Amino acid sequence: MLRTHALLGSVFALTLCASAAWPQSTEDEAARAIARDIKQGEKDWNRAQTFRNNSSRIEVLDTSIQRLERARNFASNHPGHEFMTLRYDAEFDLVRALDDEAEIFIVRRSLPKAAEKVGEALDIDPQNPRSLRLASQIEAAQSSNSYQYGLGGDRMRGRRPVSQPTVTPRY
């Protein structure tokens, strides 16, 4: 009987010690997971810079943005200086990746999508000079006719001959 009480007492004491250490270990695990997402997002961003094809770059940048947004959101849910630092790191890389995607969309003449990406970047960091420059560039392109849809098709139709080719029926 005495052994059972001693055994139960030691199990209870170990449980208390483990539960006291548990929140610290989950915070450490959370910080490591956030840092891992940030590092992988940076690797994806670096890998995107090596591609020549814009569609491949957008695909890899989307993955980078997804990882960095997850890290930012996860870090925002935790208090503490370490998580605040991780959130700022994630936000810096996220704004950089969003701006890169916006530049690709500007080149592709997809101004609504570029404006969406720049808007997201400016929501995160309203004073970012690159995002502000891209926003003014998009605004200037939208106000001029240089990026309107259909201009290329209108020019091509203007070059075609006026008469329609005649089709002779086969008997």
Image: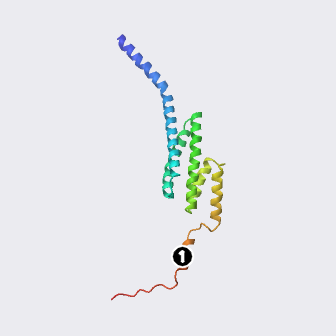
Q: Is residue 3 left or right of residue 115?
A: left
Q: Residue at the location (38% across, 15% down)?
A: 7
x, y (%) of residue 84?
59, 37
Q: Amino acid at mark 1?
A: Met
Asked if one can make out residue 167 in the rendered structure from this viewpoint, the answer is yes
Q: Looking at the rendering, which quadrant does residue 86 occupy?
A: top right
Q: Which residue is mark 1?
A: 156
x, y (%) of residue 103?
58, 57
Residue extending farthest to the top is 2
Q: Residue at the location (65% across, 55% down)?
A: 133
x, y (%) of residue 11?
40, 19
- Is residue 159 or residue 140 the one in the foreground? 159
- Is residue 84 or residue 53 the one in the foreground? 53
Q: Residue at the location (51% across, 28% down)?
A: 24
x, y (%) of residue 46?
52, 48
Asked if one can make out residue 79 in the rendered structure from this viewpoint, the answer is no
